Image (cartoon, grey):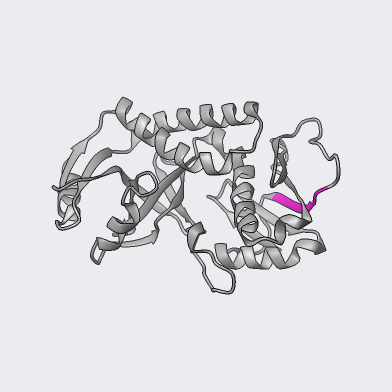
Amino acid sequence: MHTVDFSSNHSWSIGTSPDFSGWLEEFASLMSLRKGAGTGRIAIAARANGGKKSNGWNGFEGTSGHFAWNPETGEIRCEIPLDAMEEWTTRVGTYKALLVAMASMLPTGTLFLHAATLVKDNQAVLLAASSGGGKSTQSRRFPAPWWAPGDEWCIVIPDDRGGYRVQVLPTWSKVTPGVPAAWDTQRSYPLRAICALKQDTVDLVEPLAPPGAAVCLSDASRQVLRYVLSSVDDAFRTWFFRRSFEAACTLAQRIPVFLLRASLEGKPWDVLEEALRRP
């Protein structure tokens, strides 16, 4: 049995029917999951015809399967069509849908962000941007001791001290059949700051006030959600967006958020480090 850990308060043992045992081993390798038991349980099985969520369960029905969780027990059920495992692109989509099932974390203030994760001195700075916005390019340009454990998705989770920790998710576009790949998704980093990235001809950092910062963070969250919520019912999507916006507003009050104007020839890390040194 493998376990996915998103903070000490959010961990699930993952179990599958025999049909999906190969999928689980592949998923565990990609996500660097540990063996052992978690406080909750994710049960993945072949989709039953006409299966619907039971009373007391929350979730959604989508083209990738049926996903629901029980708020009282922490158990998550995923019913996935067997033929969804036949096409590689569909399998990658299933990884995303599985993460949506972890929406039980949203009421605690967790936020999914479309952002590169940069780490220095064991603290994370996020570069949030839309697809093609330069986050991958810029994260590769930052010199040591900066390094980027992820350049696409991350999860921002409140800690028990009023701050946040960041965990990266795989760069899905780089997941290809037959090519070994693994991301250390179970390691977390204290969140130091977030930057809304804008490509420019100069390098400049501008602090954002909480209202503007919340809008930027909400937009970065929607960049993730538009990929994974395209086939869910309207009620679930509305609930997900509302909870995510509430989490973005709280995060913007607690963590510095900047607009980072970054060029391709300059040294945006210099202006960023100067901004981080300010009280």
Quadrant assignment, res 270: bottom left
Q: Residue visible at 78% across and 56% down? A: 82
Residue 12 location (% of width, % of height) = 65, 52
Q: Residue 61 lies in what quarter of the image?
A: top right
Q: Looking at the rendering, in which quadrant would you find the C terminus?
A: top left
Question: Predominant secondary structure in magenta?
Answer: strand
Above-or-below relation of 99 to 242:
below
257 in the magenta segment: no
Task: Identify the residue shown where x is 46% and y is 29%.
Answer: 245
Residue 125 to residue 240: above or below: below
Q: Position of residue 28 (x, y in %)?
A: 62, 64
Give the number of marks. 0
Q: Is residue 158 visible?
A: no
Of residue 113 and residue 123, the one placed in the foreground of this image is 113
The residue lying toward the viewer, choosing from 199 and 213, is 199
Where residue 148 appears, as percent x and y from the top left, is 35, 61
The region drawn magenta spans 41-47
- Residue 222 x, y percent position in the rendering: 47, 37
**Against 81, is 104 above or below?**
above
Task: State which quarter of the image contains the N terminus.
Answer: bottom right
Q: In screen coordinates, is 36 left or right of 196? A: right
Q: Residue at x 25, y 39 (%)?
A: 258
Horizontal arrangement in the rendering, residue 49 relative to residue 7 (left or right): right
Q: Residue at x 45, y 50 (%)?
A: 154
For residue 32, side relative to residue 167 (left or right):
right
Res 248 seen here: yes
